[in-house]
Amino acid sequence: MPSQKSFSIELFPPKTPEAIDELRVTRTRLAELSPKYFSITFGAGGSTQQGTHDIALEIQQEGYEAAPHVTCIGSTRETVRERLNKYRSCGIRHIVALRGDLPSSYGVLGEFRYANELVEFIRAETGDWFRIDVAAYPEMHPQAKSMTDDVDNFVRKVKAGADAAITQYFYNPAAYFRFMENVQAANVSIPVIAGIMPITNYTQLARFSDMCGAEIPRWIRLRLESYGNDLASIRAFGLDVVTELCEQLLAGGAPGLHFYSLNRAAITSEIWKRLGLHEKKAALEPAEEKEIVSA
Ligand code: FAD
């Protein structure tokens, strides 16, 4: 596998002390895969903000690259400045800059409207200290007026100073390649890393996908539905589908893959192994992990 491609993993900050301990074990297993970095999500609504910081710091202190997510919706310039300064003082040099989504009950909109304003602010405040990744949507962000508008808005983030992008997950590689044609036509040449969501739980996947606008192609949906509660069959089929998707993306020129691990090591390790991304025997038995019901 060409070494210049980037393979990385997303984690989210758990809510309980027990889950935080479990994540330390999961992280150790995932670290055996030698990902380029771990990104850590950030709750725009406030619930997991300290968690993002703490996990990023732990990862950094263990000698791995941490890329905390920073969202701007509902935030003031001062709060974002404080977050950036904290990361900077800990030696963190990589962040994922996002607008974020607020729960509808959350009244305060803050001083930023869109992620391009956040990227601009980070560059103005911190120069080239941070590598800044932004989000991209091969199947269009659900709130965008049109694909053309969404691509224009993506280009705005790149012009504001983004170094790379990570996509929302998708199961249709043609959507990624079309998106790349569109952004390349706009003279964008930053790496757009494909976001990969492993399939282990159909109900959860369908719920996520409805929320974030990712399409589960009909043939995949029907097969997954036909398995009912047969988790072993869902997992086996999901592994085949997602591994093939990764192979097609890499063969077609995708500069890397970012795995939405949902804080589980086994499935990401298995795909990693099938793709030949590491030599170590890091694949874990599925029985070692509990099924997750929420992220
Ligand atoms: P933006 O790029 O600002 O786009 C949001 C919408 O506004 C789009 O429809 C876009 O077309 C439109 N738009 C953008 N700029 C303009 C403009 N100037 N004028 C008019 N319209 C515009 N959410 C979290 O809360 N925490 C996380 O940690 C998190 N991590 C994520 C990681 C990845 C890789 C991805 C793909 C998503 C993540 N999200 C996270 C979800 C993300 O916050 C939502 O998808 C959010 O709705 C959009 O964020 P954005 O940064 O893409 O926003």
Image: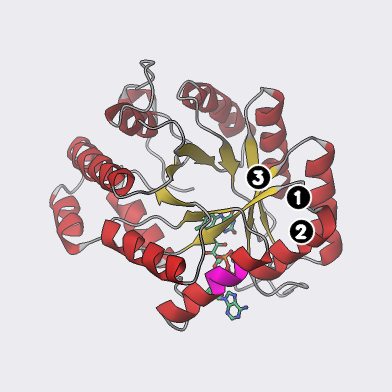
Q: Is residue 285 above or below residue 74?
A: above
Near mark 2 (Cα within 10 A), the count class, few <14, some 14-19 or many ≥20, is some
Q: Is mark 1 within 8 Å of ligand 1?
A: no
Residue 44 as seen in the image, left or right of residue 262: right
Residue 144 in view here: no
Q: Which residue is mark 2?
A: 123
Question: Where is ligand 1, by quadrant?
Answer: bottom right
Does the magenta stretch mainly form a helix, a strand or a loop?
A: helix
For label 1, the SS is: loop
Q: Position of residue 124 (x, y in %)?
A: 81, 61
> Which residue is drawn at the image coordinates 53% and 55% (left, top)?
190
Q: Is residue 156 magenta?
A: yes
Q: Which residue is mark 3?
A: 68
- Where residue 162 sits, quadrant-wise, is bottom right
Question: Observer-nearest residue: 275 or 1?
Answer: 1
> Which residue is drawn at the image coordinates 72% and 25% (left, top)?
61
Numbered range of the magenta stretch: 153-157
Q: Is mark 3 within 8 Å of ligand 1?
A: no
Tags 1 and 2 in contact by the CB under 8 Å rule? yes
For label 3, the SS is: strand
Q: Which residue is mark 1?
A: 128
Q: CA–CA distance between discs 1 and 2?
A: 7 Å
Q: Is residue 76 magenta?
A: no
Near mark 1 (Cα within 10 A), the count class, few <14, some 14-19 or many ≥20, is few
For label 2, the SS is: helix
Q: Is mark 2 within 8 Å of ligand 1?
A: no
Instruction: Give, as a three-letter code, the residue at label 1.
Output: Asp
Q: Is residue 66 above or below residue 288?
A: below
Between circles 2 and 3, the one closer to the viewer is 2
